[in-house]
Structures are given as C-alpha cells and as structure tokens.
Amino acid sequence: MEKVVLAIDVGGTNVKAGLFIGKNLVEGTLDSEPANSSGPLDEIKSGYLAIILRGVENAKKNNLRLDSINVDIPAPFDYEKGISHMEHKYASIKDVPLRPWFDEAAPGVPVKFMHDSAAFIQGAAVDAPDCTRVAGVMIGTGFGYGMMVDGEPLRKASGEPLYERYDVPYAGTIAEEFVSLRGLERLYREESGGKALSCREIIDGALGGDEISIRAYRRMAKVIADVLVDLFNEYKIEALVLGGQISRPFDTYSDVLWDGLKDVPTLKKIVRASNLELVHLLGTAVGK
C-alpha cells in the first residue's frame, strides 16, 4: 500500500488540507474547512477533527496508507509539543495541547508541526529548481518571509524563521505597514488622494490596468526590495519567489523588484509562485 501525507494549512478564516504522494496532490483530496479564529475552543476543535477525519477517509478510499500528518501554523507556537501561544487569533486554544486532537482522529499517525513560512519557502522552492539559495515573500494580512539554503529552511531553535522582515523600520513605521493587505490599501489611498478601495478591488484594478492600483503595487515592491537587499547580499540569494493572493499582479511590479535588487550579484530569478493555492500545502507535505 502506497504511503501518503495529509498536509494541513491553518489559516485565520479556513483550514486547507490535501493528501500528497511526494510533491503530487492526490486527485480529489483537496479540502477546506471554515475556521473562526476568534471562536470558542469546542468550535475550533470540531473543525480540526472534521478535516482530519475526512483526510483519513480519503486515504482509505484511495487505498493509501496515511504515513504522516504535517501541519503548518503561524507563530507563536511550540512546534515540538504542538501547543499554540497565539493571542491575536485562536486565543481560545492558547496553551492547549493539540496533539491529542490528532491522535483522537488518526490514532498512531505521526504529526509534524511547522511554521507557515517554512512551509511556504519549501513549496516555493519548486519554482526555482536550479537555485540552492531561495527566499520567499508572502504578502497577506502580514508580511511573511523565509529563506532556504541547500534544501534547509533557515530557522531558529523555536522553529520560527531565522529572520523576519515585517518589523524592519521603514518610513517612520515598519515594513509591514506597506507590505500587507492593509499596506496595499494604505498605498492606494495615498496614490488616489484619499479614495479607499478594498484589497480585492486593488488587486483586480492592477490586473485590469488601473494606473492608481499599479502605482500602489510599485511602491509596495520598492519597500520589499529595500528591506531585502542587504540580507540577499549576506546570504547570496539566487531566487526570490512571491506568494499570497496579493502578489497576483506580478507583471505590474516585477521590474521594480529587479531594479531594487540590481546590486545583488547572485540573484538570477524573481518569480511569483506558480500555484498560489497549493504552495503552502505542497511545502507542508514535503516539509522538514
């Protein structure tokens, strides 16, 4: 019986999952469960159990042996013990051991927890197969960042990224105030003279050629380059991969990234993740 990994990506509004054999998603097993990160413990637990149990059932239906459950989840989190220390979301499960939930739904199956940036960079590296020093930027509710050298994500002993970029001082505040959902909305307001659009509207505007939306994206890209250039030179980074739905209008700002990182002699590739929907799950499935 062929072995399979159940990969689970924990987000604030939903939990995604899929069965993987190596880097390949088993057809028909991509799954999602709504998640209320501000909800009570029982509601959060029932959502976890539901998606794990469906994964177990999908493995049986496909005559596959569930070899491991790999979970990517944001910090602060004890990745060895499987205990969340988050307070800004999932507050109701703070300090609650999660491993017993998995053992309840899938007895005896090993569970591995990892930081979401470690999952992302391992999934993103698929788009830079000829590079051994890869960096990844995730643009979402926040500014996520990770690096991988010779196939290993660079992490602290806690499992968190070795370097963060979201809190780098920038223009009187921090980089995340420009590189994030709220950052893009802020830049659009500044470029439009005060008009407010949602992040989704700005994304669609940039994809449709709206000049104000594109200017907001180009300013965001400059911030990204400005806070990465020194670290890229220090680690001789060869590839940068962008992820998150906000990164979608890549062609409108990629030249700004290239220009801002032109003094990194080792850099040879800047791309957007080829599959924004699966990049985290893939990295979780193959993750170390």
Image: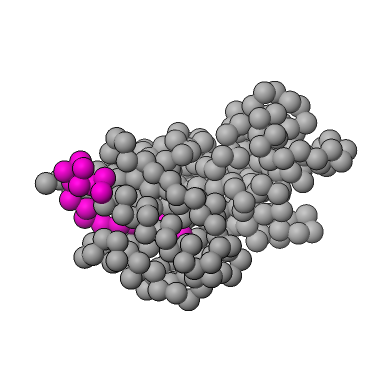
Any part of residue 115 in sight: no
Residue at figure coordinates x 34%, y 51% from the top left = 7
Q: Nearer the viewer, residue 101 or 170?
A: 101
Residue 142 rendering spot, x and y as whole percentages: 62, 53
Residue 51 rendering spot, x and y as whole percentages: 37, 52
Q: Residue furthest left?
A: 1
Which quarter of the rendering shows the C terminus? bottom left
Q: Is residue 257 magenta?
A: no
Up-down relation of residue 42 to residue 225 (above or below): below
Residue at figure coordinates x 49%, y 50% from the top left = 34
How many numbered callouts?
0
Residue 263 rendering spot, x and y as whole percentages: 60, 43
* Quadrant of residue 173 within the rendered picture: bottom right
Any part of residue 209 in sight: yes
Q: Nearer the viewer, residue 199 or 106?
A: 106
Q: Nearer the viewer, residue 243 or 42?
A: 42
Residue 229 rendering spot, x and y as whole percentages: 60, 49
Q: Residue furthest bottom?
A: 95
* Quadrant of residue 157 within the rendered picture: bottom left
Up-down relation of residue 180 to residue 274 (above or below): below
Residue at figure coordinates x 63%, y 45% from the top left = 225
Is 99 on the left or on the right of 238, as rendered? left
Which color scheme did the rendering employ for the protein?
one colour
Q: Residue furthest right?
A: 193
Up-down relation of residue 186 to residue 160 (above or below): above
Q: Write the start and end of the magenta stretch as one range.
A: 57-73
Residue at figure coordinates x 66%, y 47% from the top left = 181
Is 143 on the left or on the right of 214, as rendered? left
